[in-house]
Image (spheres, coloured by chain):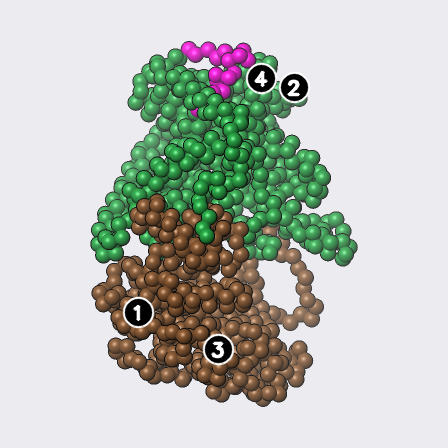
Amino acid sequence: MKTKAAVESLSKLISVGKSYQQPNGQTITIMENINLELRTGEIVALLGPSGSGKSTLMRIIAGLIAPSNGEVLYRDRPMVGLNPGAAIVFQNSALYPWLTVFENVELGLKAIGEGPKSRRRKALRMIDIIGLDGFENAYPKELSGGMRQRVGFARALAVEPELLCMDEPFSALDVLTAENLRFELLDLWLEDKIPTQSILIVTHNIEEAVILADRIIVLGRNPGRIRADFPMTLPHYRDRKHPAFQAIVDRVYKILTNPDLDEAEPEPVAIGQSAPEPQTVKYQNLPHVRIGSVAGLLELIENRKEDLYRLGQELQLEIDDILPIVEAAKLMHLVALDEGDISLTPIGQAFLEGDIDERKNTIGEQLLKHIRLVKQIRALLTAKQNQRLAEALVLDILERHFTPQEANRQLNTAIDWGRYAELYSYDDPAGEIFLESHVPEEQDEEPVDAEPTAV
Amino acid sequence: MTRPLTPANKTNGRLNWTWQDGLIILAIVAVIFGIVKTAATFTGGYDPNLQMDLSPSSLPAYTAQTLLRMVAAYFLSLVFSLGYAYLAFYNKVAERVLLPLLDILQSIPVLSFLPGVVLALIGLFPGQQIGLELASVILIFTGMAWNMTFSFHQSLTGVPRELREVARVYRLSWWQNFWTLDLPAGVIGLIWNSVMSVAGGWFFLIAIESFTLGNQSFTLPGLGSYLGTAANQGNYMALGYGLMTLIGVIILIDLLIWRPLIAWGEKFKFQLVQAESVPQSFVLDFLRRSPTLRAINLRLVEPLRESIDSQFASRPAQSARTARKHPQNRNQWVNWFFVSGFAFLVLWGTWEAVLLLRLLSWADWKTVVFGAIITTLRVIAALSLSLLWTVPVGVAIGRNPRLAQLLQPVVQIAASVPATALFPVLLLALANVGGGLQIGSVLLMMLGTMWYILFNVIAGAQSIPTELFEAATVYQLDLIQRWKTVILPGIFPYLITGIITAVGGAWNASIVSEYVQFRGQTEFTLGLGSTISEASAAGNFPLLLASTVTMSLLVVLTNRLVWRRLYQLAQTKYTLL
C-alpha cells in the first residue's frame, strides 16, 4: 500500500468559463466558474454525465482549448497556448494508422528534436514498460483495442509528461481488458516507474474513478460546473467489495442522480462557488434515449423500490448508459427518485398495465404535459394551416439555448418521442414535421420526387 | 527484452541479391537516360513546318515525349493541389475565396485556356520550342489539377479531431504535421483522383499537341499529334499503330504505377480494422521485398529525412511562451493582402471582360445562345442514351459475379482508351452510314462519358445486400416492382455520382466532338462546343470569352441547382446502411 504526498501546485484554474458564440449571435455557456487545482502526487478523476463539459475542461487544462474567461496557471505562472508539461491519452487511442507502433511512440520525441539514438532508446524502453515488446513494427490495425490503447499510453509516457491527461481511456475497451490496463497503470504510478507527477482522468465510470483516484471531482451540466470535489482516503489497491468503497460509490451516485444536491466543497480551492444558475424559461435538456429503453426500465423496477447503483450493477450498465434513461422517465413523471432509490409512479404503473395503444396514449399525455419542446412543436403544428412545420424553424429556436449539434439532437429526440406517441410525424427527406391526417390504411408509397433519369 | 530494430527485423522479405535487383538498377539508369534524352528535344528553336513521321519506328520517341509532358503536368498539378488545398484549409479567409474559385475553374473547359496560355508563353519565349512545350504542359495541367485539389481539401477537412489534437499536444512542427498527418490523410483520395486526372490528360492529348491559333497551326511532336496527323491524312495503318501504342501505354501505366500505388495506399486508411479483401499488386510486393531499395532507403532516404526533420523540430523551450503573438499578427496581414488582392483581381477581370464583350455583335450572341441550347440538348441526349444501355447492363454485370469477372477487365480497358483517339474510327463509320456530325457528336460525347455511369452502376448493384433481393423474391415482386423498389433506389447514390461526372465530361467533350479535323478537313456542327473551338482557333477572344462564360455558368448552375440536390437526396434517403 502506498499513497503519494501532494505537495506543489501543478495546474490551477481560476474562475474559468467557456462559452461559444452561435452564428445567430446567441452565446451558449458550456461551463462557468470552474475553480480547480491539480497538485503533484495525485490522481484526479473528473466525473460527470455527458454534456457536463468534462472533456472540454481537460482540454483547457492541456491547453488545447483556450477558456473564454478566467485564468489558467501552470506551476503558478499564467499558461499561454499549450500546457508545456502535459500529454494526453485519447479515448479511441488516436494513433496514426499509417505509422507503426514504434513510429507512433517516437512521434512526440521527434517533434521536440530528440536525436535518433536517444529517441530510439526512450521509445523502446516505453514500449517495453507498457508491455508491447515484439509489436514495434506492427501497424495499429493489426492490434486489438487494448493493445492500441497501450500504444496510446506509451506515446504519452515517452515524452515524460509531468501531467498525464486521459480522456475516458478505458471506455472503448471490454470489461476485462479495461480492468487489467487500469491496474497496470496504477502499478506504474505507485511504483514510480514513470516520471509523471500527476494524472487527470476524465471518466463517466464511477467505479473506475473510485478505484484510481486520490480525488474525485463531480461535474454538473447546464452549464458545466463543479458540484463536488472530495479526496479519497482509502489506501490503494482498493477492494470493490469493501463497505467503504461501496459507500463512496453510493455517495457519488446520489450526487449524480440528484441535480439539486450540491455538495459543499470540503477543500475550497481559491474562491467560493457561485450559486447554481437561476432557472428561467429554459428548455429541458432531453436525454437522447428511446421510449423503448424507458419502457424496459419500467418493466425492471415494477413492484420494487430499487437502488440505482444496484440496478446499474445488475444491468452491467455504466452511469452514462443508465442515467439518461432514468432521467427521461423522470421527465415524463413515470418514476420517482428518492435519495438514489428509484420507484414507479402511479402513471408509470398505468403505463405498464396498458396495451400498446394505451401506452402510446400515456406517453403522449405525459409529453404534452411535461416536455416543453414537444408541447411547442405540437402547438406550432396545429397553428399552421397545412399542418407541416420545417425543422429548421424549430432548430432556430433551439439554437438560442443549445449548440448546433445539441439542438439537432434535442430535435431528433423530440421527434422520436412524439412519433412514438403518434403526436406528429416526420418527413426526413423534406425535413418537415407534420400532423398525420388519420387515414385508417397505412400508406406505402414511393415518393416520385426522385426519378433518377430526370435531368 | 526489446527486439532490436535492425533492417532484418523490419520485413521478412528476401535478403540475398538476385538478378531482379540488377533489373531495378538498370531500370533506374534507363529511366534517367530516357528523361535526359527526351528533354533535350524540348529546347532549341520552334520548327513551324514540323512534319510528323507516321512510320511505326518513330512511335517510341513520340510516346516518350508525350509521357514526359504528362509527367511534368502531373507533378505541377500535384504541387498546385497540395499548396492550394493547404492554404484553403489553414486560412479561413482564403478558404472563402479559394473554394468557389476552384468550383469555377473546374467548370471552364480546357481548350478555353488554350489561346491565352499559348500566346503568353510564346511571348515569353519567342520562337523557341520550350515556350510551346510549357504551354502544352500548362494546358494538360488545367485538365488535371482541380479534382485533385478538391480531393485533398476534402481529406484535410475529414481528419478526425483527435488526430489533430495529437499533433498539437505532441508539438509537431508544420513540416512534421504535413508529412505525418495531412499528406497521409489525403493519399488515398489523391491516388484515385490522379488516376482520373491522367485519364483526362489522355482525353485532350490530340487537341493539345496539335492545334490552330489564328492563321498559324502548331504541332508538337508526340503521340497525340501522331494520332491527329494520321486521322487527318486518313492513314489508317498509322492510326492503328498509334492506337495500339496508346492502349499499351495506358495498360502499362495502370500495371506499373496505379495498381501498386492503390495497393500501397491501403496503409493510409483511417479505419482500424483489417479489410477483408485488399487491393494487391505484385509489382508493389516485388519492390517491397527488394533489398536494393531497402538499402537505398536505409542509407540515403532515412538519414536525409532525419536531418530535414530535425531542422524543423520545435525547440521545447521557446514553443510555449513566445509562439503566440507573431503568427496572429502576420496572419492578419496575409488575410488582408489576400482579400484585397482578390477583390482587385475580380474587379479588374470583370472590367476587362465587359470591355471585351462589348465588341461582340448581336449575331455573335445569337450564336452563343443558340449553340448553348443545342449543346444542352445534345448533353441530355448523350446522357439519356448512355443511361438506356448502361443501367441494365451495369446491373446485370453487378448482380452476376461470373459475368463481372469475365467482363470487368474488358470494360476497364475499353474505358481507359481516350475517346478522342477513337473519334476518327467512329467518324469513318458514320460517314459510311450517313448522318454527319449533328448526330455523330452525340455519339462522340457518349463514347467519352458513358463509362463513368457504367462503373458506378456496377458498383451500386454490387453494394445492394443480397437480403433485399431475397426479400423481393419471397414477396414475389414482378420485374417492374423489383426495379422500382429494390434496384433503382439501391443504385441511386451511385447513379447520381456517375451522372454528375458524366455530365461534366459531356460538356467538356462537346468541345472536341462538335469540331473535328478529319481527312484533311474540319468538320463541325453548330453548338456551344464548336463555338468555343472555332473562337479558339480563330483567336476571336470576345467570342471565346462569351461562349466559355456561358458554358461555365451552365455547368456551375446545373451543378448547384440539380445535381447537388439530387446528391443530397441520395445521401439522406437512399443510403444503404
Q: Which mark is residue B5?
A: none
Q: Nearer the viewer, mark 3 or mark 2?
A: 3
- Same chain for mark 1 and mark 4? The answer is no
Name chain A's colour: brown
Tell me the distance, in whole angstroms, between the alpha carbons under discs 4 and 3. 83 Å
The residue beneath circle 3 is: A239
Q: Which mark is residue A40?
A: 1
Disc 2: host chain: B
Q: Is residue A361 left or right of residue B83?
A: right
The residue beneath circle 2 is: B432
Q: Using the image as rendered, state which of residue B245 and residue B364 is in the foreground.
A: B245
The residue beneath circle 4 is: B241
Is the Cβ of the residue at disc 1 closer than 8 Å to that at disc 2? no
Q: Amino acid at mark 1?
A: Thr
Examine the rendering and report whether any part of residue A103 can be seen. Answer: yes
Q: Percent from the top left, x then y, of residue B106?
A: 44, 38
The quadrant of the rendering that contains the C terminus of chain B is bottom right
Q: Amino acid at mark 4?
A: Tyr
| B299 lies above or below A312 | above
Is the Cβ of the residue at disc 1 closer than 8 Å to that at disc 4? no
Q: Percent from the top left, x then y, of residue A84?
A: 28, 59
Q: Amino acid at mark 2?
A: Asn
Q: Amino acid at mark 3?
A: Asp
Report helix, strand or loop for mark 4. Answer: helix
Examine the rendering and report whether any part of residue B420 can be seen. Answer: no
Q: Residue B55 colored magenta?
A: yes
Q: Nearer the viewer, mark 1 or mark 2?
A: 1
Q: Using the image as rendered, state which of residue A416 and residue A50 is in the foreground.
A: A50
Q: Residue B310 colored magenta?
A: no
Question: What residue span does the magenta drawing correspond to?
Answer: B49-68
Name chain B's colour: green
Q: Percent from the top left, x then y, of residue B542?
A: 37, 29
